[in-house]
Image (tube, grey):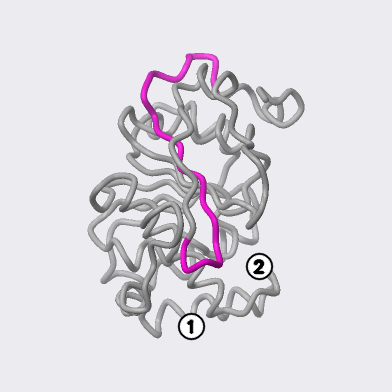
Amino acid sequence: MSNSDPGSPVALSALRGSITPEIESMLIRSVELGFLGRMPIGEQIDHSLGFVAAAESALGRSPTAVADLGSGGGVPGLVLLACWPTARVVLVDANERRTEFLSEITTELVRFGEVEVIRGRAEEVGRSEEFRTQFDLVTSRSFGAPAVAAECGAGLLAVGGAMVVSEPPEGGDRWPDDGLRPLGLVSSTRLRFEERFSYQVLRKEGQTGDRYPRRTGIPSKRPLF
């Protein structure tokens, strides 16, 4: 994956091959329940596959442990699970209905890798001993503003890991170094997939300050940048 267009038809076809009818059926159920937006299911899957391409490009390998912030209706989380069956995948969301749905369907995915559904605020999850700095990849599709995603994701991310955030197709730099520095993050690169989807990669190059993430609601009320 390059800064312009990493995806070729062959590469996208190979990625799509990881999406089983079982996973696609679960995502269709999610759409029917109103947990996903109006984007056609095929486009939602392709957008999720862009996270796979961006992450493997950033890490130079497949991740071993992934935290997906705001998993909601299952994208990109379920797609990541399908593509990385040997990884630990943790789906984080605060919504009761959505996490009940995710918990129900993931019990059917016994042949995939280790998957956990965590109902809770990302600020709290990122401060817990069980999850803090335990992941080499954090993903965020529509979790929140850049400052909120960065602060909540940084606590989960191990030094040397990467965070991949979905970005608007067009727009300027939303990731200032001064705002990221207290979190141990640096802005790495902005990547495009199939000339349709954009992603920002952040690298964890230092420790996240003990005070981050701040208590529930503060990252959005008092953003770092």
Q: Name the residue under label 2.
A: 35
Q: Name the residue under label 1.
A: 25
Percent across and percent down for residue 144 are 66, 44
Q: Quadrant location of residue 178?
A: top right
Residue found at x 29% / y 44%: 59
Is residue 36 found left or right of 193 in the rendered image? right
Question: Going 30% across and 56% down the picture, which residue do you hit?
Answer: 114
Question: How many C-alpha atoms fall within 10 Å of the one at disc 2: few (<14), some, or many (≥20)?
Answer: some
Element on which disc 1 rests: helix
Query: Which quadrant is home to the C terminus?
Result: top right
Residue 180 marker: none
Residue 92 locus on image (x, y percent): 51, 48
Determine whether 8 is above or below 25 in the image: above
Residue 48 in view (yes/no): yes
Q: What stretch is highlighted in magenta?
A: 193-212
Q: Could you tell me which quadrant the N terminus lies in?
A: bottom left
Identify the secondary structure beneath mark 2.
loop
Taking the spot 27% from the left edge, 54% from the top edge, the residue there is 87
Q: How far apart are marks 2 and 1 (CA)?
A: 14 Å
Q: Nearer the viewer, residue 215 or 58?
A: 58
Q: Residues within 10 Å of mark 1 (few under 14, many from 20)?
A: few
Q: Percent from the top left, x then y, of residue 13?
A: 34, 79
Residues at discs 2 and 1 in contact (Cβ within 8 Å) = no
| Residue 118 can be seen, yes or no | no
Res 174 → quadrant:
top right
Going by the numbered disc 2, the residue's amino acid type is Phe
Sequence-wise, the earlier of marks 2 and 1 is 1
